[in-house]
Image (cartoon, rainbow, N blue to C red):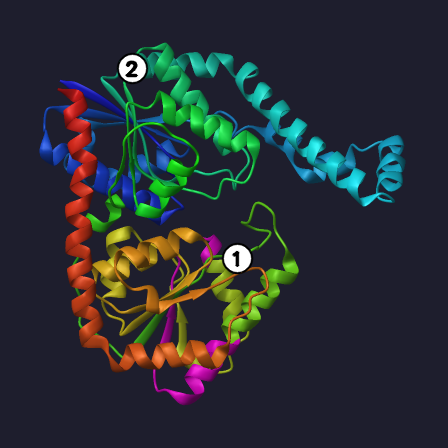
Amino acid sequence: MKKIGIFGSYNYKSIGDTAILESMVSDLIERDKNISIVIFTSDPENLKKYFSEYKYAVLKLNFVNSLPIVYSTEKKVFSRESNKSNATKIRIRLKNKLKGNKLIYRSFKKLKNFSEKIYFDIFVILRYITFWKRIACEIKNLNLLIIGGGNLLMDMFYRWPIYLFIYSFIAKLCKTTMILYAVGVGPINTFRGKVYIKMCCRIAKSVTTRDYDSKLILEKMGIGKELISAADPAICLNAGIKKRTKKIGISFVPYFDSRYWPNPDEIVYKEYVKVMGNIINKFLSIYKYDIVFFASNFPRDFKTSIDVYEKIFFKDRVSIVEKQLKAREIISLVSSFELLISSRLHSIIFSAIAKTPFIAIAYQPKVNSFCKALSMEDYVIDLDKNVNINVNEFLNKVLYVLNNKKSIELKLDQGVRELRKLNNLNSDIVFSVLK
């Protein structure tokens, strides 16, 4: 029996990542029932419960804790708050003096941030060397290690690049073939991130990306091997379709919220919540629709839904789904809406599967990339730190979508069919490597 390992940013709270994993596992087992799969995850117990209802889960799936620092109290060492509380009077004085010269201060700050991250990298390897030896034992027994899918090749969250490198390097040491599977790329803004991601790509026997733009980024980085543009595996999920109701679904990412964002900015977040509230208020004052908020990342998105809800005047026409839904449950829910407004990529993917027209709020390039693949660029609103969204222009897009639902549904159906064909390239690579 062939044994495959899958490593990614999989946890129970992120429905998008769980949807990717669900689709990957289902596809691989459907194509070859004589394989077993080890899933390296930061949330093994909850994911095990999530998959327990599937008939193949007991015999085919094994869940292994992937990241030693996730549950460690020592993670507080690297928080900004602890760094501030431990700062000496000498450091504070030095900092105040450096602020007088902006060029020197910025250079010092960059050097400080870089050295802290390198310290973290050394710490996470040496402090948890026993843990990594256990991971190496698991990887050594694999026929193939898959790193993917999802938006993995990025450094927005500063801890992530070192984990990519460690798993790649362990696979190389163990002489276990490793591939990158349906990966999203970017943002990559640091020298450290670029180095680790390049090394990961060079170790990989094969690389497939989940969209064409991700492939272009890797090509510009000088990754000198064949790169295959495929699709996000979640596009292959299916669920029961409900009858359309006069409702609009909304799923918002907690944009720059300190409860979620790696580099938060409360001023930006409050402006974002205010603008979203204004859009909904104006829409409800003109059109006779109800609004349903739901979370793709629970409870983080749920908290943002509450913040926006507080800004809405027509509360009797607004409801919030107050529980975590599974991927297929969200697809089914979204199928009942006449329109989805979302900044979450996988909510938009679920909307495409359900053939529900959508307005996408692109807080990251990955949202634009998916919409481009569906030829739905005209239904995207770009979002940046200035939150410069024109309410009237936004509502004009909403009105156009509501008046052209049938043609948009046909476009979504055709686009999803094409993306599902592209997704086959991902699993084709897996079984060509296993031969």
Horizontal relation, residue 116 to residue 99: left or right: left
Residue for point 49% across, 62% down: 383
As drawn, the residue found furthest toward the bottom would be 286
Horizontal relation, residue 164 to residue 81: left or right: left
Q: Which residue is mark 2?
A: 176
Image quadrant holding the N terminus, namely top left
Inter-mark Cα distance, 2 to 1:
39 Å
Horizontal relation, residue 363 to residue 127: left or right: left
Q: Can residue 67 be seen in the rendering of this structure?
A: no
Mark 2: which amino acid? Thr
Res 118 quadrant in image = top right
Secondary structure under the numbered disc 2 in the rendered image: loop
Secondary structure under the numbered disc 1 in the rendered image: loop
Which of 268/100 is in front?
Answer: 100
Residue for point 80% across, 38% down: 104
Label 1: how many residues lie within 10 Å, few (<14), some (14-19) or many (20+)? many
Answer with mark 2 or mark 1, whichever residue precedes in sequence. Answer: 2
Which of 278/376 is in front?
Answer: 376
Residue for point 31% across, 46% down: 212
